[in-house]
Image: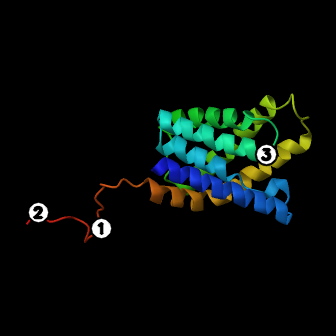
Amino acid sequence: MRILLCLMLGLVLLTLQGLLRHVGVPGWAIPQGLLICVVFLACYEFSVVGALTVFLLGLLLDMSSGVVLGPWSGSYVLVYVLFAFLSQRLFVESKLVAMLVVICATLCAGSVFLLLAVRFQSIAHDDFFTLAGQGCFSALCTPAIFSVLRRMWKRAGAVSLKRGSVVSVV
């Protein structure tokens, strides 16, 4: 169920990206919400289901971009695998660390996308400035999206340590 909620949130974030583009926000100032979901999944869901979800998020972005199917999916899966192995050593509960990881992931995913899609589009110097801008704006959106995803990711049977939440046996 959490995976479906993550995909639905990805669809909402993709719609917001499209709305920002149609409103006239420059491309470098549009955050990559789907990539933030990928980083979250790399840190909290290290499994085959997580990799499949990341692939589907990339496929959503591929279908909406209209270039060719595959480059975003491939770059998202590569970023997922890379940061899933690194997340064991990162303290992603810190907002600053999560923001820095998102900046690095944006640059990594964008570079891999450009390498995979070089056959279908030309690479310009502006593409790297766009990636840097998107990385910064994605980092600013990271705490909000991470908090929404953390609420969805809480385990159903987990007992909270708050005062009234412990079940009494008596």
Give the SS element for disc 3.
helix
Give amino acid for label 2: Val
Against 167, is 49 above or below?
above
- Mark with earlier residue (2, 1): 1
Task: Tell me the quarter of the image containing the C terminus.
Answer: bottom left
Would you name the residue on which mark 1 appears?
162
Does residue 169 appear left or right of residue 36 in this picture?
Answer: left
Question: How crowded is the residue under tag 3: few (<14 C-alpha within 10 Å), some, or many (20+)?
Answer: few
Would you name the residue on which mark 3 appears?
65
Would you name the residue on which mark 2 appears?
169
Residue 94 visible in the shown view = yes
Dot in front, 2 or 1? 2
Instruction: Please say if the residues under marks 3 and 2 sit with CB atoms less than 8 Å apart.
Output: no
Dot in front, 1 or 3? 3
Q: Position of residue 5 (x, y in %)?
A: 52, 54
Against 67, is 142 above or below?
below
Q: Position of residue 163 (x, y in %)?
A: 26, 70
Q: Residue at left 55%, top 35%?
A: 51
Q: State the CA–CA distance, disc 3 to disc 2.
A: 56 Å
Does residue 47 appear left or right of residue 57 in this picture?
Answer: left
Q: Between 41 and 138, which is closer to the camera in this rendering?
A: 41
Give the SS element for disc 2.
loop
